[in-house]
Amino acid sequence: MHLLIKSAKLFNEANAHHLQVVDIEVKAGIIQRIGAELSAPGATEITGKELWVSAGFVDTYAFFRDPGFEYKEDLASGCEAAFRGGFTRVLLQPDTFPYIQTKGEVQAMLSKAANAPIQVLVAGALTENLEGKDITEMLDMHRAGAICFSNGDKAVADTSAQMRALQYAQHVNALVMSYPNDAYLSKSGQVHEGVVSTQLGLKGIPALAEEMQIARDLALLSYTGGRLHFSKISSARSVELIREAKAAGMQVSCGVSAHHLLLNHEVLPGFDTNYKVMPPLRTETDRLALLKAVAEGVIDVICSDHQPEDVEHKFLEFDLAKPGIAGIETAFSVVASACSPKELAAVLPALNQRPAQLLGLPAVSFEAGAPADLVVFDVAETYMVEKANLRTKGINNPFIGQNLKAPIRLVVRGHHHYISHA
Amino acid sequence: MSAISTKHLISIKELSTADIETIFNTADNFKEVINRPIKKVPSLRDITIANIFFENSTRTRLSFELAEKRLSADVINFSASGSSVSKGETLIDTVKNILAMKVDMVVMRHANAGACEFLSRNIDAKVINAGDGAHEHPTQALLDAFSIREKYGKVEGLKVAIIGDILHSRVALSNIFCLQKLGAEVMVCGPTTLMPKFIGELGVKVSHNVREALEWCDVANVLRIQLERQATRYFPSLREYTLHFGINRQLLEAVGRDITIMHPGPINRGVELNSDVADSSQSIILNQVENGVAIRMAALYLLAN
């Protein structure tokens, strides 16, 4: 492998060339040179209209369905999809079957993914069988390589269980991930409760279901101490709750899915189940507040919330379809499509630097001699998402057939690389 | 002959006011037909219609079937309860079966909002929604508005109160859209727990006091209350509902206005409506039933052409 990235604007604060247009030579998985007007005979040149280059993206919330649901996705297809989406490090959620809830399952996952193009990171289950009752062997899992603990999409309804989990995780100073969703207020809900749910006769999930759980968890956190991360939030009021908690000095962080930055509930008429997601798509006011909060840093990270599904679970009546978008390949372009180039520059740290920090991962270096971990995309281009070009097994991507901005041109992680010719 | 702008009849939302007028004018003709000694016309000869009911229904299914037979269509009926097979598989399989049987039109009732939309996107046949979850029941709204028009000569400018369980009601939603398109003013009235929080954003008045609603309206469309089918109890008892939201002669006389009473049926006599109201001269409930056949004939006829 010998690559020469030509005239790309670098986004890497630690580097002297940050925000400069540079050429980067990569050979054998190592950054060889970075500077102006480089030439490298024999190298494959990566060129474009207006290239940007950044550290490979880090995803804090994705499901690869392996083991247990390999017909929806498996580790190999998930990793390849992630890599082509610009993600070089991905935290997998424990909602597999069996659940990732013991040392053995953590080790098995990490060893199975050892040769993947991306670095697979594992969140151990927070509670046994994700039932939200008894806490798991977190210390053992942590020693085996689980870097944080999460109950995935199954919010812990039992307050005392959530309290014990927050207390126990502190033994290893582990991050606890919480999907804020009140099980009672959201029961049988399909979409955001609002004028659109009213028009469509679909049972609504009030934003209150999320906000109450955030308020509850923040109260617990101030009692227990520890580190809490809300995996995906969706309402403007949630942003304010977290803004206030951060201002009060609490160790709290939060994420938002890429699709919540581009879509609102007005896409729902037509009952396309690809738009059924949890938390639900909310109002335009919420969307704009989320986008602003990412740029301000109140929302720390943007995740893919990659949830691949097969025909049997998605091609159904709206109420019966599983929620989720298989969006890890399009997540970055979805974010780029929600932003002006200036806004994209402001939210980029939520895709690379901040999630790495949050998960305690080493920062990516662009210095000569460093292992390459980068993504190159063209902010002056758009492309049409085509099913044939996606590597996920999931059929559920509402952006298929749509034009998105900033196609990815190159992804490199050490010896692994992907060049897009689309 | 006129036509309507949509290929299917899935929601009132997607109809134009002109479409509704076309359906009404066509229904006027069919109403005359079904009052003739020979009630049958050959309009839909060689057209095959499948009535597929995933939810129990007596009068809607009968009304559609009668409308189809009056138009000389070939009719097949399929009823299924969702208990034995997973509902999702059933609908997909239904889609495949319809495709294989070369059915021209499908009339479907289903427990899930959007099910008819789903069907229409996946089969060639034309789809008529006979009720999908809490979404819409377009022919009910059309026959309701048609009955109001018949009584008053117009719908525009009238005040219509829809009273009962608004939260779970496809009839309420379709009625709101239909009446608004025709220029009526709409109020919804029911217990706070049976009122969608954002219903006001549809441009309707909201009341939680049945007397207030009756004092305001020209027409009261009273919905059936179903305690038995609710997984969650939205109100404590039928008794309490009747005491606070039931409509009886005494209440109507106290209000002292000549209000027209409607009900989509079947009535829970003594719950939302007392017999002394349902069977009174103010009630047009049986006219609604008769008009239902004419409206459904019109819808079937216009879609088939």
Image (tube, coloured by chain):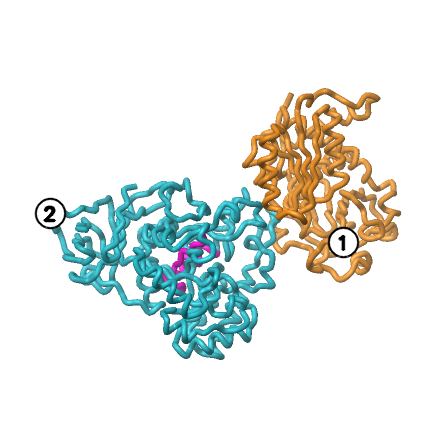
Chain colours: A cyan, B orange
Q: Which mark is residue A41?
A: 2
Image quarter of the C terminus of chain B: top right
Asked if disc 2 and disc 1 are in contact, CB closer than 8 Å, the reply is no
Instruction: Classify mark 2: helix, strand or loop.
Output: loop
Instruction: Specify the subunit that label 2 lies on.
Output: A
Q: Is A294 covered by the magenta stretch?
A: yes
Q: Which residue is mark 1?
A: B212
Q: Specify whether residue A243 is in view.
A: no
> Residue at horizontal 26%, vertical 47%?
A419
Residue A114 point in image, percent of width and height: 31, 61
> Residue at horizontal 45%, vertical 55%?
A287
Which residue range is magenta in the image? A286-308
Count of numbered circles on the image: 2
Q: Which mark is residue B133?
A: none
Residue A346 falls in which quadrant of the image? bottom left
Task: Report the front residue among A184 and A28.
Answer: A28
Image quarter of the N terminus of chain B: top right
> Residue at horizontal 21%, vertical 47%?
A46
Instruction: Specify the subunit that label 1 lies on.
Output: B
Label 2, residues with CA under 10 Å away: few <14, some 14-19, many ≥20: few
